[in-house]
Image: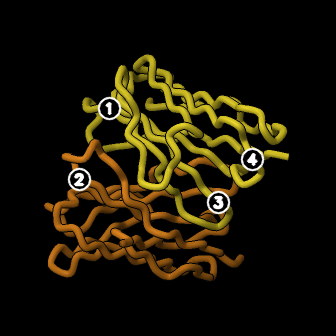
Amino acid sequence: GAVVSQHPSWVICKSGTSVKIECRSLDFQATTMFWYRQFPKQSLMLMATSNEGSKATYEQGVEKDKFLINHASLTLSTLTVTSAHPEDSSFYICSAGTVTRGYEQYFGPGTRLTVT
Amino acid sequence: QQQVKQSPQSLIVQKGGISIINCAYENTAFDYFPWYQQFPGKGPALLIAIRPDVSEKKEGRFTISFNKSAKQFSLHIMDSQPGDSATYFCAASWGGNFNKFYFGSGTKLNVKP
């Protein structure tokens, strides 16, 4: 169990447009979801933590108005990159956790975003 | 300030050899230490995890050694195989912080046939 999916797996968009990435916990209810960004050959950088029904908590340096996070249900969180620019091109990964499963975070397969 | 320091950055091991990756942390509040394996273009997958009340945990060919006094923990991959070639990340967290993970910088392992 503990499967997390992401959609789309890859997306190409034009500069100035917005793109939405979905993260779903398929077989458990996620009280907390996390969004990470990963550049090539680098570690995962936490962008924000979201709890169902409340506003996301963003890490220092992450623009809240640019990276909109919504955690509307216990199985779905979305990340919207608004007015995307080429420097937003990256690998975005979500993870989900729940109190009933202890400390563990279950990671999605990631979404490759390319902004042209 | 980097909460978790990982070394080496890259590692080359012959097939059948032992791969050892080390991590060190500063925050004594950390109480959960997982290791993740990541293949190119994929999300991280949990390999093995340990809590500070034990000094060692073994699952198949993977072993975590934990030294609480030194604030260090390491991953040992026994009988390394070419299929183990991937990037490995250590992480640390504490339950009072929404399980936020602090990741190490990663180690790229290459197991030569």
The label nearer to you, 3 versus 4, is 4
Same subunit under labels 2 and 4? Answer: no
Q: Which chain is orange?
A: B
Alpha carbons under labels 2 and 4: distance apart: 35 Å
| Residue B48 x %, y % | 38, 56
Q: Which chain is yellow?
A: A
Query: Which mark sits nearer the N-terminus, 1 or 3?
Result: 3
Q: Secondary structure at mark 2?
A: loop
Chain at numbered mark 2: B
Snapshot quadrant of residue B111: bottom right
The label nearer to you, 2 versus 4, is 4
Marks 4 and 1 close (CB-CB < 8 Å) = no
Q: Secondary structure at mark 3?
A: loop
The total of numbered circles placed on residues is 4
- The residue lying at 72 percent from left, 41 percent from top is A84
Chain at numbered mark 3: A
The label nearer to you, 2 versus 3, is 3
Amino acid on which the number 2 mark rests in the picture: Trp
Crowding near the residue tagged with mark 3, few <14, some 14–19, many ≥20 C-alpha atoms within 10 Å: few
Alpha carbons under labels 3 and 4: distance apart: 15 Å
Q: Residue at label 1?
A: A98
Q: Residue at label 2?
A: B94
Alpha carbons under labels 2 and 1: distance apart: 14 Å
- The residue lying at 17 percent from left, 73 percent from top is B68
| Residue B84 x %, y % | 60, 64
Q: Which colour scheme appears in the figure?
A: by chain
Query: Which mark sits nearer the N-terminus, 3 or 4?
Result: 3
Query: Which mark sits nearer the N-terminus, 4 or 1?
Result: 4
Q: Is residue A53 left or right of residue B55?
A: right
Q: Residue at label 4?
A: A85
Alpha carbons under labels 4 and 1: distance apart: 33 Å
Q: Residue at label 3?
A: A39
